[in-house]
Image: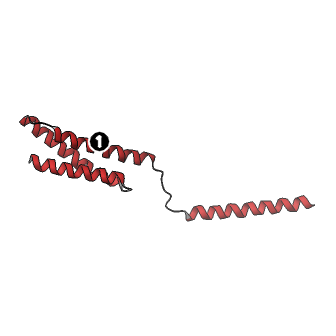
Amino acid sequence: MKKLCIILGFIAAILAVILAVTPLSNLAIFPLVIAFLCGLIVLFISKKQKNKTKTIQYIFLLVIIALTLTIYKGVFNGNEIGDTEALEIREEENLKDSKDILEASEINDTY
């Protein structure tokens, strides 16, 4: 049970770090949770058996790195505009209105 959780924890933590670096950083949450839970299970098993916890530290280190990268990308990446057609139509209308105002002011200036 302990070895299975260690292997699963390492694989999930490494996958979380890889996903956190890619544009799919939102998907890194699932492996993060799995790695964290596996790390906790191994921690409790190691505490009962009084073994060394070096592998647990590595799992938690990878989890912290992946979580930091995911939060960073979530906070500092700007939102993308999905529908730009409405903005383009509004821009064209503003351009037409500006031309109309400019033409009306030119007519008034000549008289």
Residue drawn at the location 7% of the way across and 36% of the way down: 48
Q: Secondary structure at mark 1?
A: helix
Q: Position of residue 68 (x, y in %)?
A: 34, 43
* Residue position for label 1: 64
> Which residue is at the front of the view, 16 or 90?
16
Few, some or many C-alpha atoms within 10 Å of disc 1 (few <14, some 14-19, many ≥20)? some
Residue drawn at the location 22% of the way across and 42% of the way down: 58
Colour scheme:
secondary structure
Query: Horizontally, is 101 left or right of 26 in the view?
Result: right
Residue drawn at the location 22% of the way across and 49% of the way down: 34
Direction left: furthest residue: 49
Q: Position of residue 35 (x, y in %)?
A: 22, 47
Query: Horizontally, is 31 left or right of 91 in the view?
Result: left
Residue drawn at the location 85% of the way across and 61% of the way down: 106
> Which residue is at the front of the view, 3 or 100?
3
Amino acid marked by disc 1: Ile
Tally the marks.
1
Direction right: furthest residue: 111
Q: Position of residue 71 (x, y in %)?
A: 37, 45
Q: Which quarter of the figure has residue 75?
A: top left
Q: Position of residue 45 (x, y in %)?
A: 10, 40
**Quadrant of the frame with the C terminus:** bottom right
